[in-house]
Amino acid sequence: MLYLPIGTIQTATVIRKIETGYVLKKETDEVLLHHNETEVELKVDQDVNVFLYNDKNNQIVATTKIPNVLMDTYGWVEVVNVVPKLGVFVDIGIAKDILVSVDDLPIYTGVWPKIDDQLYVTLGKDQEERLLALPATEGIFMSMREIAPLDLLNASISGRVYYTSREGSAIFSEDGYRGFVHHTERESEPRLGETVSGRVIEVKDDGTVNVSLLPLKEERIDADGEAILEHLENNDGMIPFGDKSDAERIRAQFGFSKSAFKRALGRLMKQGKVEQRDGKTYLVK
C-alpha cells in the first residue's frame, strides 16, 4: 500500500535532517522535504502536514505549502505559461506549475487562455501518474451557481469564461451567476479564462442568464461612425464606399456589416459630418 500518494495532504513524521532538507516518513514510505519547501525549522520526531507532488524528475516530494486546489477540490488558478501543442501551466500555490493539457483546451488555439487569465480547476493525474489540472465541467458550475433574480435583467455583469465555442460562450459571474453569450451577442469569440463584461438580456426559468457583450445600438452606431470618420481623415477626406457598396468590401475594410455601416453613415449625414456623391463618401469640411 502506498501511504504517500501525490496530490494529497498527509501528516508525516520527520525522521532525520539532511543537507538538502528533511526526510519524512508515514507508515513504511519516506519522502524528501526540501529546505525551500518549508518556512520553519523542523525537529526530528515532529509531525508535519505536507502536500505531495512529483518534481521535474518525477520523484515524489513534499511541501508545507498547501495548494489552492486538491483532488476533487476546485479553485480559481492563474495561467502562468502557454506552451503550444502541450497546453497551459497554472499556479496552484506550490513551487511547481501544473499543466492543463491540450486535451482539455479548445481545439482552436486562438481562444486558449493567456498569461494572467484564470481557470477553475481541480487536480487529477495522467496515465503516468503525474499531476494535471482539470478544468471544471458544466455540471460543476451548474451545481454551484446562484439563482439569478428577475431584477437582474438589463443589469451589467462581469464574469470569467469557462467554456467557449463558435455557438457561444459560458461565463461564471463575480456574484455566482451562470451566463451564456450567444455568438450573435459578441463581436469576437473570447478566450477561455478571460474576464468579460456585458449586460443581462434574459433571466431564464432555471436561474441562469443570457448575456450580451455588444454595446447598445446607439453606442454601436457612435463607435462605427468614429471608425468611418477615422478612415475619411486618413484618406484625404474621401472613401470609395457608399450605402450601395458591396457588403463584403465593407466588412473587409471596416470590420462590421453593411447594415451597421448604413446606420452609422446615416447618422453622420444627419449630423452634417459627411456626404455621399457618386457612390463615394466625403468628409464635410
Image (cartoon, helix red, strand yellow):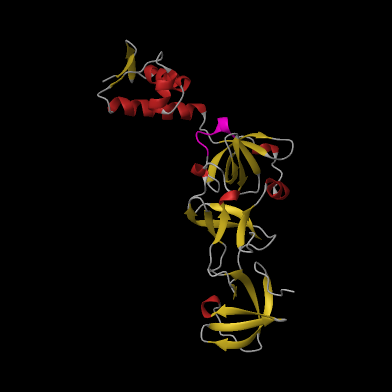
Q: Position of residue 16 (x, y in %)?
A: 60, 88
Q: Height in image: 52 above or below 48? A: above
Residue in the image at 59% along x and 79% along y: 32
Q: Position of residue 46 (x, y in %)?
A: 65, 86
Residue 158 shows up from this direction: yes
Q: Is residue 260 left or right of residue 158?
A: left
Q: Nearer the viewer, residue 141 or 87?
A: 87
Residue in the image at 42% along x and 27% along y: 224
Span highlighted in magenta in the image? 182-189
| Residue 188 part of the magenta-drawn span | yes
The residue furthest front is 128
Quarter of the image for residue 229 reads top left
Residue in the image at 34% along x and 12% along y: 279
Residue in the image at 66% along x and 43% along y: 178
Q: Position of residue 112 (x, y in %)?
A: 52, 46
Q: Height in image: 131 above or below 197? A: below
Quarter of the image for residue 278 reads top left
Number of labels in the image equals 0
Q: Height in image: 71 above or below 45? A: above
Residue 225 shows up from this direction: no
